[in-house]
Image: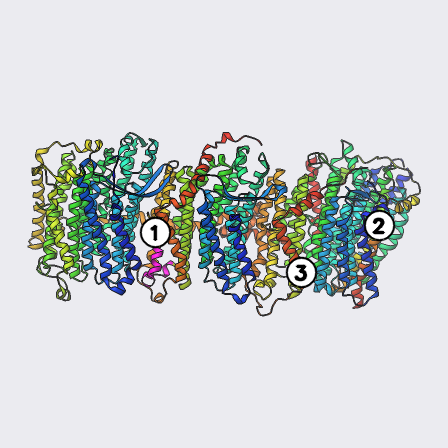
Amino acid sequence: MAGLTLNHFLVLGLILFLLGGYCVLARRNAIGILLGIELILNAANINYVAFSFYGGQAAKYDGQVFAIFVIMLAAAEAVIGLAIVLAIYQNLRTIDVSATESLSG
Amino acid sequence: MGPLITFYALALLAIVSAAITAFSRNIVHSAFALFGALAGVAGIYVLLGADFLFIIQIFIYIGGILVVTIFAVMLTQGIADVNVSNRAVGVLPALVTAGVAGGVMFYAIIHSSWYHARPGSATPTTYWIGDAFLGPYVLPFEVASLVLLAALIGAIVISRQEVRE
Amino acid sequence: MELGNLASLQAFYPELLLTAATLVIVLIDLLTSDKSWLGEVALISTSGALLLIGVGPLDGGAWLFRRMLVYDSFSIFFRALIALAALVAVWMSIGSQEVRRCEQGEYYSILLASALGMLLMTESANLLMAYLSLEFVSLTSYVLTGILRHNRRSQEAALKYLIYGGVASGTMIYGMSWIFGMAGSLDFMAINRALFATSHIPVLAVFIALVLILSGLGYKVASVPFHMWAPDVYEGAPIPITTFLAVGSKAAGFALMTRFFYPAISHLGPDGNWQPLNQVAWPQLLLVVCIITMTLGNLAALQQQNMKRMLAYSSIAQAGYALMGFVLLSNDGLIAMLVYLFAYYVMDAGAFLVVMIVANLTGSEDISAYRGLAWRRGGALLAISLTIFLLSLTGIPATIGFIGKFYVFAAAIRERFYILAVIGILNSVVSLYYYMRPVKAMFLEQPVDSVSAVTVEYWNYGLMGVLALATIFLGLYPPPIISFASNSLRFFISSS
Amino acid sequence: MNHPLTLITFIPLIGMALILVCPPAFKAGYKWIAAATTLPQLIIAGWLVHNFSTNTAGIQFVERYPWIRAYHIFYFMGVDGISISMVLLTAIICFISVFASFSIEHGEKGYYALLMLLDTGMMGVFVALDFFLFYIFWEVMLLPMYFLIGIWGGPRREYAAIKFFLYTLLGSVLILLVMLGLYYYGVTPTFDMTQLAAQSSSYSMTFQRICWVALFIGFAIKIPAFPFHTWLPDAHVEAPTAISVILAGVLLKMGTYGILRVNYAILPAASHELAWFFLGVIGTVNIVYGAMVAMAQTDYKKLVAYSSISHMGYVMLGMASFTAAGINGAVLQMFNHGTITAMLFILVGVIYDRAHHREINGFGGLAQQMPLYTGITGLAFFAALGLPGLSAFISEVLVLIGAWQRHPVMTVFGAGTAILTAAYLLWCFQRIYLGRLDEKYASLPDLSLREGFTLVPLAVIVIVLGWYPHAILGLLQTSLNHLNRVVLAATPAQAVALH
Amino acid sequence: MNNPQTVDFIRWIVVLPLLGAAFNFLLGATLQKKLGRFAVSITGCGVVIASFALAVAAFLRMLELVPSQRFLLDDLWRWFDIGGLRLDIAFWLDPLSIVMTLIVTGVGGLIHLYSTGYMHEDPSYWRFFAWLNLFTFAMLTLVLADNLWLMFVGWEGVGLCSFALIGFWYTDQVNTSAGNKAFIFNRVGDWAFVVALYSLFSGLSKVGHPTLIIREIARYAPLLGTQHAYAGISVATFVTLLLFLGATGKSAQIPLFAWLPDAMAGPTPVSALIHAATMVTAGVYMIARLNFLFSMAPLTMLVVATIGAVTALFAATIGITQNDIKRVLAYSTISQLGYMFVGVGVGAYTAGVFHLMTHAFFKACLFLGSGSVIHALGGEQDMRRMGGLWHKLPVTFWTFLVATLAICGIPPFAGFMSKDEIIWSAFDTGHPWIWSLLWIAAGLTAFYMFRQVYMTFFGEFRGTDEQAHHLHEAPPSMSAVLVVLGLLSFAGGAVMLPRFIATFSPFEVFLAPVFDSPQTLAVTAQTHHQGLEGYFAALSLLLVAAGWLLADLTYRRKILSADRMSRFLAGVPYTLSFHKYYVDELYDYAVVRPYMMATRAAGWFDLHIIDGLVNLAAATTVLGSWLSGLFDNYVVDGLVNLAADATLAAGGRLRRLQTGSINGYLYGLLAAVMVILLVRAVLHT
């Protein structure tokens, strides 16, 4: 793995994190925002796995296990999230979040 | 040089796909582009010796989460108006926010010393992970099952009302 | 003492009970058609859990489940608080007309699951466990928020909660990954060892990681700037759930936050003061957060017309007061925080309870619905109770809220945070204005409908009475709660 | 009587409980329960005065039990010469205000219950010697006051009530901060006022100054001292008669009492240094300014309210003099102001009950129709303007004699305001009571027996104290002279810089 | 003097009128209704007469003592004892106070009797007597007080009664305004009086003798003469100047005289008792009482004498043009009081007190006589509508004439004895200019007094027919009093004959123990021109005769025309005099109006600025600077209640942050993180 350092992975993670962050900020579609969240989670996962890989024996599997749990919880969140989105869609006929501003002030 | 080229290829795939996800004005495109991003990340996992995680990423993430998401997209969006389905607002402030935060964090990454920053070896991990789940991580493992159960019930309770209508 | 997986179970009965109750309720729900008594089952389970927490082994603490959890007096305090919050939430649910229209089995099982998640949050000794339990609480909360049928506000609140929570926890785990990268471990004590071992920690990176983690924890305690979900969610959710979130979820957030920022990344000095990581300016950051939180919460609450929303902002402000104890870096401050949180539990639950009773009566949560309540037949007791709770939230003496504020301000003065104390004091003066608005409406205005009598179920009256009396009694004689809080401030931090 | 102070403080609470459980069918009984509650209180107050030893400056009738051990908080009560007079005043005013309340016509249950709670709060403030306990009582008063003004008050009652509440809360939170500061930065952490006083020299001078000013603001709002006085006219104008009576008769005294009890006793060095401005100059401004603004009022009650501000200025000026005459005069003035202003507010209430307005220019010639009422008003007015032979004269004279020795210029202004006071009071008297009787008031009845009953005891006190001030001065002297010596002996140099 | 004899009936001299007042205040109305006015009269007059009897008894008791021991004390109880100020409620009877007591109770008793007739028709008869009794009580307190604070009690007490009695007929706002004016003018003087007492007490404290007991002050007064108060002025001077300012208020001297003419709005017996015979002389009494102190302050003495002389002349010049029968007498009172002040001012204390006494006789007689006229005319007071009354009201006329002769200083009437003594003393002690002022004033006095006599009693009756029809002499209760007072005016001066006539004067001897302190003697001993006294008396008489003649020519024989005279003088002095030199207007424009404006300004200030500022302070602390836009808005709109509004507005702003947009919330989350990081990064580098 010559030339490939931890920082490569961290920067990749950072870029994904930022793209995810941009996505959640700029999107108006609820699902679009959820996609952004997935990007953030993946960015974190890259970090965990990379640290796990570069972290030596002590951290060997902790990072990977964490990443597995992140994926698992992402799945759970996606299920609930999509259920809510569908419910909103049923009520409002749109999932544009600009329509969900009845609670404010 | 091999791993480096592989890395860059995978990184490029992940970043470009992620960028499409983030910037596309079509929610369907965004959703499908996420596929590429997740696949790229899965490749990175291989590169980092996380073979089990690679499988999980493909099976659960791509096979499960993403497919559900695309279903949801299909259910909620008429095909006719997909072109403007993923409206973006406040592009500039969002870019500035991400850019500034990214700059600072990039600086921090470059100038930080991380724990034992030396590469490990890529050995099969499935066994060890299985062992961990039944050993030190048994509680999280069990709790996760409860979380999934609760999520299941929750998803049902929220969507059932709509089905009944 | 580090307990293995099986040995840990002896300290885990409350959680097991709640797990069992969650499953049992789902099962009963499937098997029976009369679901009106599921609430009572949940009530018995939470009472049981509270009892089990009370009688749990108290032998100085232990690591549970291979250091995933920690069992110490600090966690007992919060577990008790959360069990109490769950108890109140269940009790209120039974008396709530909103909840009666929901799916009973799912509702109560998820409520109990959420309580379980909160218990785990208070005990987490590992980043993974912290994330998992926090997410557990979040996921169940999303569902509970969105559980009201055909209620657009409920659904909207759930969506906002979900998206906000997702981003916040995503940001948090990204930050956690950095901590992991620096410490090489997910275990709090190992993190502590690793960070204090070297003299050259990457200060900026640690700070960034802490800020990112704070976004997840701050979102749970609803502190500025991570508070914005709270008003909408509190307003949209059914009132028992609002109460549960405002009291339980917030307490769990404080527990986890304390456990992370104190034993995990700070050193306890011999004098009871904590030494934060060198040069990492999280105390200063949290100081600013604390000040802004209480100020913004109070100012934003000034003009609210919806009681729930007003109480939502008020609970943001209350979190700010509790944070005052948090930022002082002393055990005194933390004790003050515990006292404050307990006080907050009693008075806020009481306030929400009255809001629910009034909503049951009038179908409205607006302050205008409270007009002349005191002058309606049977309404005086309701009005007096709400007044007691609101005054307590303001911090007027002879209520438990005053004891809370007294402790927090005392700790701040003792640690020479004068400006903080003055700002806190001024905030409590400002808060009087909006807390008195419903009081004004109830007492100083005449009822629109003066004919019909106010009828309240004994079920709700009972709880209201208990909470109101507790507010006054503990305000006049606080030693029980004080000794409980001061005995609770013992973190189990031995590494062996 | 083993626990006279506990008894005198909490008897009203028993009354409150009785009123609350009394079924609505016995509506007429509420006021009699209230009266039956305040009477024993008055008797106990008399008993206390009778058994009070005037030979010692120490505290008497002490009751002290641990309360919150974690903060060394005690349930600590006791009276000395300063508080005994205030206890007596409170008992008298509360008793009378119950009878002044008989015209309340709706929500009697709540009214009398809150009145009783207020009574407990006020009495508690004067007997508490643990700072924490003092603070609790101090704040406990706010709420009943808020409701009593807010529910039973005039047209702008809501505004007045919340203004009162916000102002006084602002003041009291400052007191809370100082209280905590004193607790932590003394040699021994304590809330015991006597102990705090004993260890006053252990506070650094800067700390003392900051605390002193913060406390002063807290108490000044209650007095109310210029420029924190603007809540008072509003509160008075909107409050029902009995509440105005209590407000002016007792509540305002708490500000000056607090300054004596806390600022002077616990922070003597800072008092020595700062009083000339904060009490002397501001007190003089209060006197002159209050009188001038009173002249400009057209609302009878507002005029009395501003005159009250003016008269409280004498208390402040007397306290600033640090002479035996000044400081004794100040506390005597507190007592006298309490009785005289109470009379004035009852008198305003009498006419308001009949004519339903208070516009000074809207009256005239009432003396013809209501001679008895006019006579007592005249007595009260002349008492208020410091006519010799009536009580306020003695106290004002003592204050000014004392003040002259230290602040002659202020004294000249303070004494000169007697002219302005005479001007506005006489002008007011002339416009309301003298002149031709307006036809629409030709059928107003004179004082009723009940009204007479509220006024005559006060009138008697006013006259008796004019000729025998020793009745009160005798109680005060020893304690106040001791306090005065303590303050005079305290110089900034004595404060050890511990911090 | 050190061991005064304690006599415990003196208190009753004082207390009896108080009891009478209390009785009539509490029961008078009922009594009058049930039993008639008689019951009220009995108590009202009885107590004063009893008081007088006791005073006589005390006087006799005193005479039994050797002159240097003629001091009686009645100590009731300790009033207060604070900070070295140890005062008792105690009464102190010495030759000076017994003289005054006899005047107060004697003349007062007569006026009480007179009032039973004069006020007989008044429905508030009981109230009149109650106040009159209370006045007597207050006056006696003033006179008999053994310390200055107790004296001040009486000092203000008489002011109160004066206020109440001037406004006795309160349905007319003119009367009540006059009462207010009297009280407030008196208050100005009282203010000076109390400041003087503070200063005196403070000065005595500094020399180690904190006291305000008069006999003790007498002992320590010499210590004050050298003690400096301010700007080189000694404490004694400072104190006495202030005391004298107090006296000008009470005794209607320049600059505080303007209330007395208006005070004539009260019933005539009141004018006689309070505004002529007793209360207004309190200032003179006070100075005589504190002669040892005033004698320490030559500057004050000079001021007293000068003010007295100027006032005497000034008031006389106003008196010549007034048409109201009582106003003429009021100005005459002011003028005569000026004489008394000259007396005490030049150190002729005995003369001053003597004139006080004779003035009490003849001025009471004049007032009561005018009251009788007014009574007869059904309330008419304008002399232009009188005339020719002498044969209708013979008793009134003759007594009035006697009193007029007395006031003009025609020998052998009482006024001559006392007035001449003062005029002579002024010259004798080296104040020729004061003598000249008094001399002119004496001429003017004769003119306006005879003008009054002629306008009232001579010529044709100028009133309405109805008045003419009802003209009648006063009832016996009134005319008897007039006769007694007329006799006193005639013979009262016999107790102290001028030195060029008699070498022994019992009055002077009797009072001598009071005025025998060394410092007083030092002032009074300046007699240089013994032999000239008789000539000066003749000189005075000459001018008096001229005044009389002029009045006679103008108003009886109508040879001279008043109008023409005034035109001859270009009208200016006449106009000034007629309008009382515009003093009231001056006070109105210079003091009253500016003050009223100031109070209104203060009221506005309080309502708008203070309330606003306090709120503003709150606002600024809460809001910080970022609300500047809003802030400006409110500054423009006014400062009232800014705090609440602005705080609420801040809340409104903050609420608007909560847009309801989830993207906005996420911005809140992530942008906040970004800002924190940025700030931290900037700080880091």
Residue C404, x across and y down, in percent: 63, 47
Which residue corresponds to mark 2?
A: A71
Residue D333, x across and y down, in percent: 41, 46
Between the residue at mark 3 and the residue at mark 1, the CA separation in whole angstroms equals 58 Å
The label on residue D382 is 1
Q: Give the quadrant of residue E176.
A: bottom left
Q: Amino acid at mark 2?
A: Ile
Which residue corresponds to mark 3?
A: C462
Q: Is residue D365 magenta?
A: yes
Q: Which residues are magenta?
A: D360-382
Q: Amino acid at mark 3?
A: Gly
Viewed as shown, does residue D97 lie left or right of B103?
left
Q: Chain of mark 1?
A: D
Q: Chain of mark 3?
A: C
Q: Nearer the viewer, residue E87 or C306?
A: E87
Q: Amino acid at mark 1?
A: Phe
Residue C260, x across and y down, in percent: 75, 42
Viewed as shown, does residue E342 lie left or right of C58?
left
Can see residue B99?
no
Q: Mark 2, mark 1: which one is toward the viewer?
A: 1
Q: Is residue E85 magenta?
A: no
- Of the 4 image quadrants, the one containing the N terminus of chain E is top left
Same chain for mark 2 and mark 1? The answer is: no
Q: Nearer the viewer, residue D126 or C380?
A: D126
Q: Chain of mark 2?
A: A
Q: Which structural element holds mark 2? A: helix
